[in-house]
Image (tube, rainbow, N blue to C red):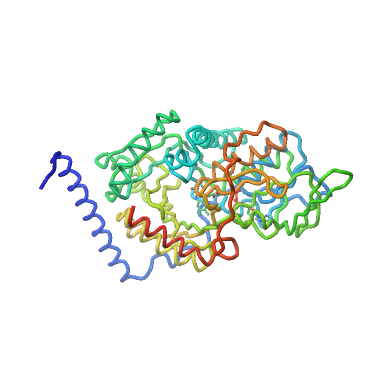
Amino acid sequence: MLGRNPSKQARSLRAAYAVAVARVRAQLELFALELSPPVFQNARVPCGILDRAATPPAQSAQELPESVDVAVVGAGYCGLSAARALAKRGVKVAVLEAETFGWGASSRNGGMVLTGMKLPVPTLIKRYGTESARKMYAASLESIDLVEQIVREENIDCDFSRCGHLEVACKQAHFDGYEESAALIKREFNHELRIIPKSGLRGEIGSDIYFGGMVDEASAGLNPARYVAGLALAAQRAGASLYDHARVISVESETNNNARRFRVQTSKGTLTAREIILASGAYTTNATPALRKKIIPIGSYIIATEVLPADLARELSPRNRMIYDSKHFLCYYRLTPDNRMLFGGRAAFFPETENTVRRSAEILRRGMITVYPQLRHAEVEFVWGGTLDFTLDVMPHAGKIEGMYFAAGFAGHGVAAATWFGAKLAGLICGDPHDIPFDGIKFLAAPLGLRSGNTWALPLAGAWYKILDWLT
Ligand SMILES: Cc1cc2nc3c(=O)[nH]c(=O)nc-3n(C[C@H](O)[C@H](O)[C@H](O)COP(=O)(O)OP(=O)(O)OC[C@H]3O[C@@H](n4cnc5c(N)ncnc54)[C@H](O)[C@@H]3O)c2cc1C
């Protein structure tokens, strides 16, 4: 029985049938693969593909100074962008990094420089109102411009390219929502997104499992490890002092002659600072417990295949977009400039360990072959993991905590957002007007069981999102 619009119903039945056939075929291929030994067993753990190509990190300064104007905790995009901006304005700044420069999420991510935020625009508007949501969205566009400007000004060789992103719909209902979202974003934010019906998807992606897509040409891609290395060199050139293997152990506020300063104890010695910027992201430690308890550290994992033949790479991603799907438990993927397929996702929710990395490799490989059966024989050469900083409301937050500046909660948008927030915090310290649209949002602590160092409830959160993906 066909309803009032038989041709439309017949088309969607045909589309659903084609998707079901593609999925069954992919499952059968996977089943066949499971009978053979895992291809990833020779993959190198942890990461290499991206930072192998990175320029050498900036030289660490030797001795800690006795005092600085600003001490920055963490040398990822946020801390280094802040340090660069402060040093350019003549501020004496020291960056204290527990490991090596860019060691955290900033060298391990997918290199997607994305518009918008983790939360969909209708949710943003519902929660914060149109005016605030407009400012937040504008900040996301501005942050991509800032990354582009820094890359150009500092001559950072990181393959930055405005290649756009493609979001693909895993269900018809998700695709139906795209039309609504794109119209809302055009009307309220004057920003154009393009809807790609299922019939046009092959021009964007060499996969038949999706129900359609949405393209944003403003997004970009880059090599994350090269970008963070370039940012470190740029901060250093501007006059910032960078200290690696300088883990901050404690920060105490003290008042002398009515002037407040912070005493920062590190594994390399002690210094005092007029202001502190906490830019320690998902790796925030007990040195700053007030911030740590607000961050939900979530693992994300990536595999990269061998270098693919050029025609196969073109078939998989004809426009070289940054691609992610519409699920809560999402997959994100892209080609690297040397034509590897880089495929990531929240295969395990726990922060990375050798064990979660290894298990994730096989899960991700299955996911990759479900999307791209063409890659069933491609060797997975690299696998790695990192930790993202989520917050309870899935929003970025910035401001002051116990007198210290901080920014956190960038989730999967930190390449652009962390760069932008770092520069904004530097501006606040230098007396710029306070115009961070995220500042007024209440920053609640993470529930017990989801906090750094004690994440026993993460699998429950993961299961919840899997159920949501089934239901919605
Ligand atoms: C696998 C993966 C894929 C991702 N993909 C994308 C993507 O494609 N696009 C996107 O926009 N975002 C992505 N993200 C998120 C993005 O990488 C992060 O949001 C961003 O890098 C955060 O930058 P940051 O400077 O805040 O923190 P980080 O880069 O994590 O840096 C924090 C640093 O602080 C240091 N630190 C912590 N505590 C101390 C201490 N006590 N003393 C001294 N140093 C300390 C750590 O060692 C660390 O180096 C991804 C993340 C992961 C893990």
Residue 411 x %, y %: 52, 49
Q: Which residue lies furthest to the left in this view?
A: 1
Q: Nearer the viewer, residue 107 or 377?
A: 107
Q: Where is residue 181 in the image (x, y as percent from the top left)?
A: 37, 37
From the viewer's perspective, tell me whether residue 384 is left or right of residue 278: left
* Quadrant housing residue 446: bottom right
Taking the spot 71% from the left edge, 34% from the top edge, the residue there is: 88
Q: Is residue 463 shown above or below 137? A: below
107 displayed left or right of 249: left
Left or right of 367: which side holds 154? Answer: right
Residue 426 in the image: state x and y as whole percent. 68, 38
Above or below for 294 versus 42 = above
Does residue 16 appear to the left or right of 378 in the view shown? left
Residue at far right of view: 257
Q: Which of 62 and 428 is in front in this view?
A: 428
Instruction: Give residue 240's quadrant in the image.
Output: top right
Total marks in image = 0
Q: Which of 311 and 60 is in front in this view?
A: 60
Residue 60's x, y, as percent? 72, 51
- Tell me what residue is drawn at x 75 percent, y 60 percent: 267
